[in-house]
Image (cartoon, rainbow, N blue to C red):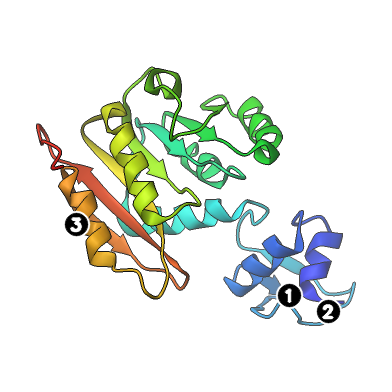
């Protein structure tokens, strides 16, 4: 039996995609040996061990890696998560921060997000369109951190960032995920973020077509049109 299938059959992960991700990240061992190939054949007599909880959405691992490299999140933060999707950012950040509020537009994700919120006292979730919903509905409390991982063109993601800036505390921080292609001029995008009054602290470039921009808003800065 393939190792990724075994993880699902033994209810270690809910899906094969989560199993494959965990295996390739080196988080699964068989009989004490770390295995990084999902196709590894094993038997029922083999002992499977995991280094940590691997049955989490992809965003959980993404934000964990970002946090390890940037220390974006702090213990007493109030966080706003734009585009919560399957809830990975919510689940990871709630382990660190005081409260995180997620906003998601897609109907398909709402039941799962509501379940997550119901089982975590420091998570709230609302359904809404970040392009149009009133800011006071989005959040009635200023955020220490705004995280944005929207499946939109990078220019549109920055438009949303500019729109929600009134919800960010002075000196607040952002994580802006930008979906890019081979032809994307990343410098243009970074300049647009800086023009909103941000100082870039980290730019993380994973082995996929997106970049992670961590920045801090300058105190008393003015937005450059």
Residue 98 position, x and y percent, is: 42, 29
Q: Which residue is mark 2?
A: 42
Element at label 2: loop
Residue shown at 58% from the left, 56% from the top: 58
Q: Which residue is mark 3?
A: 191
State the separation of the CA atoms marked 1 and 3: 47 Å
- For residue 30, the mark is 1
**Residue situated in front as seen by the camera: 213 or 64:** 213
- Earlier in the chain: of badge 1 and badge 3, it is 1
State the separation of the CA atoms marked 2 and 1: 8 Å
Residue shown at 65% from the left, 25% from the top: 118
State the separation of the CA atoms marked 3 and 2: 51 Å
Say whether residue 74 is left or right of residue 133: left
- Earlier in the chain: of badge 2 and badge 1, it is 1
**Residue situated in front as seen by the camera: 156 or 9:** 156
Mark 2 in CB contact with mark 1 (< 8 angstroms): yes
Q: Quadrant of the C terminus?
A: top left
Q: Residues within 10 Å of mark 3 (few under 14, many from 20)?
A: few
């Amino acid at each position: 039996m393939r190792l990724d299938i075994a993880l699902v059959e033994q209810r270690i992960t809910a899906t094969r995609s989560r199993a494959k991700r965990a295996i390739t990240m080196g988080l699964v061992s068989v009989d004490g040996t770390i295995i990084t190939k999902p196709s590894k054949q094993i038997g029922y007599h083999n002992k499977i061990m995991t280094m940590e909880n691997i049955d989490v959405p992809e965003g959980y691992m993404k934000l964990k890696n970002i946090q390890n490299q940037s220390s974006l999140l702090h213990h007493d933060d109030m966080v706003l998560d734009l585009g919560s999707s399957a809830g990975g950012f919510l689940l990871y950040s709630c382990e660190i921060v005081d409260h995180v509020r997620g906003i998601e537009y897609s109907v398909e994700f709402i039941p799962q997000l509501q379940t997550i919120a119901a089982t975590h006292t420091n998570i709230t979730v609302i359904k809404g369109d970040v392009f149009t919903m009133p800011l006071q509905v989005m959040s009635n409390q200023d955020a220490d951190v705004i995280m944005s991982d929207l499946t939109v063109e990078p220019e549109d993601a920055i438009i949303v960032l500019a729109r929600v800036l009134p919800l960010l505390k002075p000196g607040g921080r952002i994580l802006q995920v930008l979906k890019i292609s081979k032809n994307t001029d990343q410098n243009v995008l970074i300049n647009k973020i800086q023009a909103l009054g941000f100082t870039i602290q980290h730019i993380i470039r994973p082995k996929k077509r997106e970049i992670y921009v961590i920045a801090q808003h300058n105190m008393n800065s003015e937005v450059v049109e």
